[in-house]
């Protein structure tokens, strides 16, 4: 029999955890390793569980609120060739493992086996019906079907260790905390067959309040699903898939998700947040949203922006049909009237408490149709992007801008900050400058990956087609900033020309012409390609 490692993440639910563990101990398959990863429980779990289950491996980690972190910790400790996942509020039926192990033995190309489950919903005491309908599960090369519907219940999933080594572990990005399992299943489906067993082999408690991650707002769920599709698109560019999934297939799925996301935002009366999704949908299909929905969005977005302008005593109007469409990317706690303010969801911020964003998303994942934006501005955001990603974004933003539209970027002035660092003998002042240059590091995104200054901005922006560059020097608490403004002006540079200049821009960072540095350049170029420059952005 194959050894199965069972990973059980938990947080503050000792009675449910005991029931889950008992369901594993009662399996008819005997060769089982159980690993419980406690996500920083503050109840009696750390005291009571080791006493009651002394033979079971129990590891307490720092609380993250992310099931992905706990599951990955368990995977790294696991010794089995097969790895099964069980949430601590769920249970298995006795023959669950034996049925799945049998499938793996008979089918060496299968990478994942899952099944149906009984479901217990809010205010229900006993399972009475299956979670999935008869036609929802699929077996074989299931990527297209999985894109349409995530039929894999995490507490029924068993995966080969070799498959995880091939596709990677759960994504620990907080923005994906609602769908980190779906993200992994899609990657698995690109590389191997999946078998779905119609048998009801688990009891699944569909009650968000008792999960590690807690309840997820509906709108954030759809936003996360869109991020998953973009991650899959990049993954497929880097890997050879066992299945043919065209970009048109992914585009259709993205369109469906944007429609669902927009409806969720409308139901939550978040009209401004619908704008980028509606514009993207209408660029592909002008009738995608329907006239009634478009009228509702237009009316309420205008009223909301006008109301905000009046409340802030601003003198300019925005977002009515004859007014500019302007983006403020990475707004944080700064609201700019007349702009669509965009930033991460508050859950990804460790320090900021009062986000002023109209739209919660990763600014690097935004998409607007070509020639629709009048202004894009970023204050202390651009330095957070890796070198290839920064070039991709500059090309995308150029495509979004109307002719004559302008881009404004403020970053630390790397040149002046280094000069000041070398001048000052005071350690505290030096460390303050280093933090300004390299980031505060209180979150995974709070790292500055690159340094920018006048000469570099001039070379890169000019090469990519930005004209009429102007620079403004600034100071902040003894450190130095630089602001550059460029416009999309004549002659307009095509996307093909921009992409052709990327190699030359990246090549300036090479140390020499050695084989190692040549491979470095090729790696950067591949990274640039896999960041996904939109072909419809210009």
Image (spheres, helix red, strand yellow):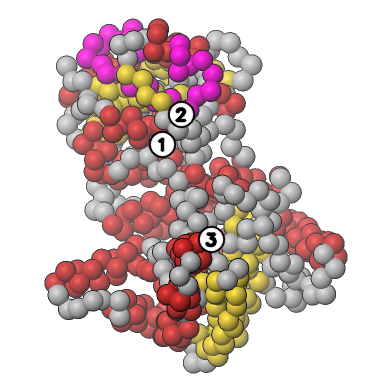
Quarter assignment of residue 142: top left
Q: Residue furthest front?
A: 425
| Nearest to the observer: residue 35 or residue 399 | 35
Instruction: Pinpoint residue 161: horizontal percent, then vertical percent.
Output: 23, 33
Visible in this render: residue 39?
A: yes
Badge 2 marks a residue whose secondary structure is loop
Q: Is residue 370 above or below residue 472?
A: above
Instruction: Pinpoint residue 361: horizontal percent, then vertical percent.
Output: 56, 54
Q: Is residue 274 above or below residue 117?
A: below
- As measured in the structure, the alpha-carbon distance from the residue carrying label 2 to the one carrying label 1 is 9 Å
Answer whether residue 24 is magenta in the image.
yes
Left or right of residue 67: residue 206? right
Instruction: Pinpoint residue 534: horizontal percent, then vertical percent.
Output: 44, 68
Q: Which residue is mark 1?
A: 69
Q: Which residue is mark 2?
A: 39
Callout 1: 10 Å neighbours few (<14), some, many (20+)? many
Sequence-first disc among 3 and 2: 2
Q: Residue furthest left?
A: 515
Q: Quadrant of the N terminus?
A: top left
| Nearest to the observer: residue 84 or residue 34 | 34
- As measured in the structure, the alpha-carbon distance from the residue carrying label 3 to the one carrying label 2 is 29 Å
Circles 2 and 1, Cβ within 8 Å, touching? The answer is yes
Visible in this render: residue 384?
A: no
Residue located 17% across and 78% down the image: 513
- Mark nearest the camera among 3 and 2 is 2
Left or right of residue 474: residue 271? right
Callout 3: 10 Å neighbours few (<14), some, many (20+)? some
Q: Which residue is mark 3?
A: 363
In magenta, the rendered stretch is 22-48
Residue located 55% across and 10% down the image: 126
């Amino acid at each position: 029999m194959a050894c199965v490692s069972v990973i059980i993440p938990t947080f503050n639910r000792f009675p449910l955890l005991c029931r889950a563990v008992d369901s594993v101990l009662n399996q008819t398959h005997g060769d089982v390793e159980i690993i419980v990863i406690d996500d920083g429980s503050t109840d009696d779990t750390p005291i009571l569980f080791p006493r009651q289950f002394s033979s079971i491996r129990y590891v307490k980690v720092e609380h993250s609120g992310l099931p992905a972190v706990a599951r990955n910790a368990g995977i790294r400790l696991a010794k089995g060739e097969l790895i099964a996942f069980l949430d601590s509020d769920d249970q298995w039926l006795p023959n669950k493992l034996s049925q799945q192990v049998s499938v793996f033995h008979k089918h060496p190309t299968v990478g994942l086996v899952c099944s149906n489950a009984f479901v217990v919903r809010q205010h229900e005491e006993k399972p009475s019906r299956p979670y999935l309908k008869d036609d929802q599960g699929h077996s074989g090369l299931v990527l297209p079907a999985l894109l349409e519907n995530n039929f894999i219940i995490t507490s029924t999933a068993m995966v080969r260790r070799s498959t995880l080594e091939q596709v990677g572990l759960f994504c620990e990005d907080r923005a994906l905390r609602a769908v980190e399992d779906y993200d992994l299943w899609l990657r698995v489906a690109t590389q191997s067959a999946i078998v779905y067993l119609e048998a009801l082999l688990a009891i699944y408690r569909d009650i968000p309040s008792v999960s590690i991650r807690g309840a997820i707002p509906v709108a954030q769920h759809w936003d996360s699903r869109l991020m998953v599709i973009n991650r899959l698109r990049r993954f497929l560019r880097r890997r050879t898939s066992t299945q043919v999934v065209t970009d048109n297939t992914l585009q259709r799925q993205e369109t469906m998700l944007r429609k669902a996301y927009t409806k969720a935002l409308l139901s939550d009366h978040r009209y401004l947040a619908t704008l980028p999704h509606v514009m993207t949908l209408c660029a592909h299909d002008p009738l995608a949203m329907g006239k009634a929905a478009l009228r509702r969005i237009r009316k309420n977005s205008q009223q909301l922006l006008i109301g905000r302008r009046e409340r802030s005593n601003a003198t300019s109007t925005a977002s009515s049909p004859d007014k500019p469409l302007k983006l403020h990317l990475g707004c944080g706690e700064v609201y700019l009237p007349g702009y669509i303010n965009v930033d991460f969801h508050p859950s990804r911020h460790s320090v900021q408490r009062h986000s002023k964003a109209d739209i919660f998303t990763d600014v690097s994942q935004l998409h607007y149709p070509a020639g629709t934006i009048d202004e894009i501005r970023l204050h202390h955001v651009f330095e957070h992007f890796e070198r290839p990603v920064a070039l991709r974004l500059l090309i995308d933003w150029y495509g979004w801008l109307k002719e004559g539209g302008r881009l404004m970027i403020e970053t630390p002035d790397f040149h002046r900050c280094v000069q000041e660092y070398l001048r000052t003998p005071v350690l505290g002042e030096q460390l303050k400058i280093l933090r300004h240059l390299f980031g505060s590091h209180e979150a995974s995104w709070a790292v500055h990956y690159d340094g920018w200054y006048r000469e570099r901005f001039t070379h890169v922006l000019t090469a990519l087609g930005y004209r009429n560059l102007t620079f403004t020097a600034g100071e902040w608490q003894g450190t130095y900033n630089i602001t550059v403004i460029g416009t999309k002006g004549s002659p307009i540079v095509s996307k093909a020309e921009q992409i052709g200049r990327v190699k030359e821009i990246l090549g300036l960072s090479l140390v020499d012409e050695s084989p190692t540095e040549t491979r470095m350049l090729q790696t950067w170029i591949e990274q640039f390609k896999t960041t996904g420059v939109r072909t419809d952005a210009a």
